Image (cartoon, helix red, strand yellow):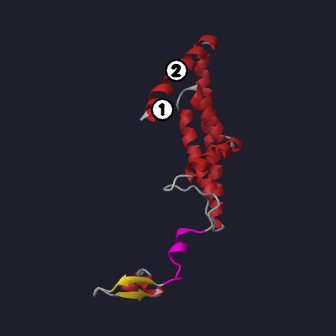
Amino acid sequence: MPWLFILFVLVPALELYILIQIGQVIGASNTFLMILATGFLGSWLAKTQGLATWHALNERWAKGQIPGKELIDGAIILVCGALLLTPGVITDVLGLLGLIPGSRAVFRATLQKIFSGHPAIRVGVHMGTGYNSMRTSDSAPENTSNGSGGSAAVSGAAKQRPTHSDTD
């Protein structure tokens, strides 16, 4: 609950205070132009970095690799692009830092450190196996109930799902 208060009350109030202070120093019209400039710069950076990350993600998929780093980068770019749409100095600085590739690595490392300790959420960039390779391994037979209370071993062929040609 305190995070929601900070996010929706304190941050906007602080942003408004900073913008008023900047407006008193450089003038209201220059402050407005500064907000527009950071918006245009942020949208351009979000577009170029997003496309670069998208191409890197597709290259990893084409090589048969899991694009963990690219997925995390895409999420960071999405959130930081949204921060740049919010008028304010603090959100603009955080948004711009997340869109610059060098500083995005710091964001990524921080996110991995936060989420790697949580048992329900695992953020891995160097994952070597995928869901299908774990699902189709037939190293040990599985026991399932045969309806009469006993159990029967199921072979690898019986575990496969039927295709359209099998049901016709």
Q: Name the kind of residue labelled 1 in the image.
A: Leu
Please, is residue 57 above or below residue 74 in the view? below
Please, is residue 163 above or below residue 1 in the view? below
Residue 75, image x, y percentages = 56, 48
Please, is residue 98 above or below residue 54 in the view? above
User: Camera-side residue: 88 or 111?
Assistant: 111
Residue 67, image x, y percentages = 62, 59
Residue 37, image x, y percentages = 62, 27
Label 1 sits on residue: 7
Give the residue drawn at x 41%, y 82%: 162
Residue 121, image x, y percentages = 51, 55
User: Camera-side residue: 1 or 54?
Assistant: 1
Stretch in magenta: 129-140
- Give the mark, 2 or 1, whose residue is nearer the N terminus: 1
Q: Residues within 10 Å of mark 2 (few under 14, many from 20)?
A: some
Q: Name the kind of residue labelled 2 in the image.
A: Leu
- Left or right for 147, reference 92: left
User: Would you say residue 133 sits in the magenta stretch?
Assistant: yes
How far apart are the two marked residues, 2 and 1, measured between alpha carbons?
A: 14 Å
Give the residue drawn at x 29%, y 85%: 149
User: Would you say residue 26 sits in the magenta stretch?
Assistant: no
Label 2 sits on residue: 16
Give the residue drawn at x 59%, y 26%: 89
Quadrant of the frame with the N terminus: top left
Quadrant of the frame with the C terminus: bottom left
User: How many numbered marks have been drawn onto this rendered protein structure?
Assistant: 2
Mark identifier at residue 117: none
Give the residue drawn at x 66%, y 56%: 56
| Occupied quadrant, residue 167 | bottom left
- Left or right for 98, reference 13: right
